[in-house]
Image (spheres, rainbow, N blue to C red):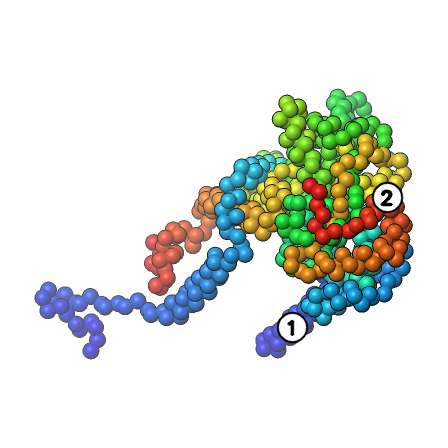
Amino acid sequence: MSTSELTDQRTGRPEEIKAVPVRRPGRWIAAFIVLVIAASIIRSVVTNKRFEWHVVGQYLFDSRILHGVLVTLELTVLSMIIGIVLGVILAVMRQSPNPIVSGGSWVYIWFFRGTPLLVQLLFWYNIAALFPSIDLGIPFGPSFIHAHANTLITPLAAALLGLGLNEGAYMAEIVRAGIISVDEGQTEAAQSLGMTRLMTMRLIVLPQAMRVILPPTGNETISMLKNTSLVSVIAYTELLYSAQQIYDVNYQTIPLLIVASIWYLVMTSIAYVGQYFIERRFGRGFTRAQQGSMRARWLSFRGPEKVT
Amino acid sequence: MRKRFVAALSVLCALAVVGCGSSSSSTSSSGASGATSSSSSGGTATSASANASVVKLVPASIKSKGTLTVASDASYPPDEFIASDGHTVIGMDPDLMKALGAIMGLKVKVVNQTFDSIIPGLAAGKYNVGASSFTDTKEREKTVDFVTYLTAGESFFTKTSGGTTVSGLSDLCGRTVAVEKGTTEETDANTQSGKCTKAGKAKVTVLSFPDQNGANLALSSGRAQLGFADSPVAEYQVKKSNGTFKIVGPSIANAPYGLAVAKDSGLTTPLLSALQVLMKNGQYKAILTPWGIEAGAIANPKINGAIS
């Protein structure tokens, strides 16, 4: 008996089709297995006395740790600003038809990506051993500022120089990837309209390149949050160093490293949220697949959702 | 299609096997530097032979293993440092431990670990003995047991040209001092800083570095005015610096060095007896003299002999 022959006795209209969602037992079984594994891991971690969770709770909001969190955030934000600005400049220089300019940019990127960040930090911090005094002015000419290296380059300046200049080299490659991802036709059209190279870059290419630059940049920022822990080798008081200062005295190494890790996780998670909103803003008008709201995607557990 | 898949799979398997093979052959013990060393000759310690009465005191679990694992932070010449071959730990502490091990009928393996990870590592059972110029303090005796074997003070050193002078801890107010993380010098400098601020004077800026080399570099680059380390170490630095550094002020806070062992390890009694044997047959002095530390020799080793 075909369904089209069924009619509702009362109204005479065809009966509504009893559409049952496709049963997907595999999804439910897989979900169950993942939840069971997660629950057993969480349980073994939470009930394990050797983690000394009471010590973790004791130091989680310690003033030294909170100060360390603030310093880490400060270092991350400032180094990323320096890195991004420098990265854009270097990437544009790399695209220059002038071989000296693009070569200079290449040498910078090669050097700062080719040496370990730890070594760079140590060099900036101990720069007075190589250049006891620094003169700023016209090269091979008169100098306007003359200062002792350690007063001009404070520990904070050394940390920012080390982190920022290194980040600039990595960002330069990311920005270059974004620039070359923009179709050449855009540049040609801009040139045919009479725009200069710099105008083209600023108004046409870079705004379109943002979509490709943003996910790796978010990655770099999250990476930078952790890289700031390297400044503990130049005795700068950020989060990891603060935790080390505490456990050097009370020998509670593991609980304090957990405290530091929890704070790094919190800061990283906030960065995730920020990145999501920024990407959505710059990805407008590109792909419809990303337009569905998060709620719709989670509720598609039962079956494929309707395209709204 | 199938042939290519099988070829790719076999290449991956081969790589995995090579990867596993190389990682298992690099028998590195855990820790930041991870450099292990075989018990090879260093210094001029004459080899001792096992003493039956001492061998009886060694706990069965260690006797069956036949090897004593010793942790040292090899950035502290002449007490412990890396030989010119790049991985063997040599110095007064390894020499002493090898002689003690020989008397106890055990082989000795010296591993290089960062200083502030050794005491937590002993408590966690990763090593048997910590021989790293540990000052025996009441605070540390809460976590580990000590067998005293030397007496040493703390000394200040500074740059010969343009350095500063101090005559004791009270002169530190308002100065910058570079120390190694986790040392008694770090604690003493921080305590003095508290005393300075209480007396209305400027605090002591304490720069703590992961190893003594970082502290020495900070001193030579002018980030710190003073270095502060154990007297034998400070004297060795000055000697090796060919006139760059000099000792200032007298050595203070003479305190015993102790070999650290985990509580209830059963090693305190055999180590003490072995040490007494070395002192009686003159080998103890013979080990200290080549490193220039004979002035710190003691006559009565003790278990947990902290004086502060």
Q: Find the residue positioned furthest to the left.
A: A10
The quadrant holding residue A225 is: top right
Question: Which numbered tag is attached to residue A192?
Answer: none
Q: Amino acid at mark 1?
A: Cys
- What kind of element bears circle 2? helix
The quadrant holding residue B51 is: bottom right
Q: Which chain's residue wears label 2?
A: B
Q: Point out residue B206 in the picture as x, y percentages from the top left corner.
A: 69, 35
Question: Which numbered tag is attached to residue B13?
Answer: 1
Q: Which chain's residue wears label 1?
A: B
Give the vertical position of B19 relative to A54 (above or below).
below
> Can see residue A174?
no
Residue at (75, 37) in percent of width and height: B253
Estimate how packed mark 1 is, as few (under 14), some (14 to 19) or many (20 or more) residues with alpha carbons within 10 Å.
Answer: few
Give the vertical position of B251 relative to A41 (above or below).
above
Which residue is nearer to you in this view: B201 or A86? B201
Estimate how packed mark 2 is, as few (under 14), some (14 to 19) or many (20 or more) residues with alpha carbons within 10 Å.
Answer: few
Residue at (66, 34) in percent of width and height: B191
Q: Amino acid at mark 2?
A: Ala
Nearest to N terminus: mark 1 or mark 2: 1
